[in-house]
Amino acid sequence: MTDKALIKVFIADDHAIVREGLKQILADTRDIVVAGEAENGVDAVKLFRRSGCHVVLLDISLPDKSGIDVLKQIKKEKPDLAVLMLSMHREDQYAIRSLKAGAAGYLTKQSAPKELVTAIRQVAGGLKYVSPALAQELANHLGEDHEAPAHETLSDREYQTLTMIASGKTVGAIAKELSLSVKTVSEYRARLLAKMKLKNSAELTHYAIKNGLIE
């Protein structure tokens, strides 16, 4: 197979073991090659440009930036580039948000290697990829006539703040992790509580657990 026929993949994940595992899986294919890698969001945006990649494998939880924010930045620069989101989170938590933000597909890190290879080939060909389970869930969702859950009305940043608060993190810790001011995170918290008609962080945490938004 010639270089022109190869699918060039760029990997962005903060865990070296995950990156090595992905590279090992892809090394066993004849038509896919890893063209570059990054361990954080800033490097991902900087280095993917040089890689000449056809597909970006992007972790949704990077240490310095939200994967969805990185996704939006990549799509702004290269609208036609296929971005396949990887996550430890269940599909129903972030998949729809990722697809709405421009992702070509969404895979959990528990997915089988064969599914990963299939997904890369599919999105490289200009198609979307969702797992059979997610496809069924989307079909069920479209067939239902009901009001969307409160958390689905949140912006991506508000939703991220919700999950972090529900996981026990303070506003100060969230601000530091997201490189935001405490005031900004407090505003996100106030907005999401208002949208969801909740009074405090305790009610927010109870809601998140009840709806399976955190592990």
Image (spheres, rainbow, N blue to C red):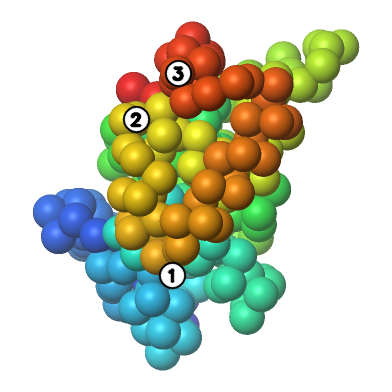
Give the image location of residue 209, x and y in percent: 43, 15
Give the image location of residue 49, x and y in percent: 46, 86
Identify which residue is drawn at 41% across, 28% down: 166
In the picture, measured across the screen, residue 127 lies left or right of residue 118, that is right
Q: Mark 3 points at which residue?
A: 202
In the picture, measured across the screen, residue 127 lies left or right of residue 5, that is right
The local secondary structure at tag 3 comes to helix
Give the residue type at disc 1.
Ile
Identify which residue is drawn at 52% across, 56% down: 183
Give the image location of residue 38, x and y in percent: 29, 72
Q: Name the residue under label 1.
A: 7
Q: How far apart are marks 2 and 1 (CA)?
A: 38 Å
The mark nearer the N terminus, 2 or 1, is 1
> In which quadrant will I find the C terminus?
top left
Q: Is residue 90 above or below residue 20?
A: above
Q: How would you rate the neighbour count of disc 2 (Cα within 10 Å): few for under 14, some for 14-19, many for 20 or more?
A: some
The mark nearer the N terminus, 3 or 1, is 1
The local secondary structure at tag 2 comes to loop
The reply to whether callout 3 and callout 1 are in contact (CB within 8 Å) is: no
Picture quadrant where residue 69 is located: bottom right
On the question of residue 132 being in view, the answer is: no
Picture quadrant where residue 137 is located: top right
Picture quadrant where residue 29 is located: bottom left
Q: Mark 2 points at which residue?
A: 167
In the picture, measured across the screen, residue 87 lies left or right of residue 55, that is left
Q: Which of marks 3 and 1 is in front?
A: 3
Give the residue type at disc 2.
Ser
Identify which residue is drawn at 76% across, 21% down: 148
The reply to whether callout 3 and callout 2 are in contact (CB within 8 Å) is: no
Identify which residue is drawn at 63% across, 20% down: 198
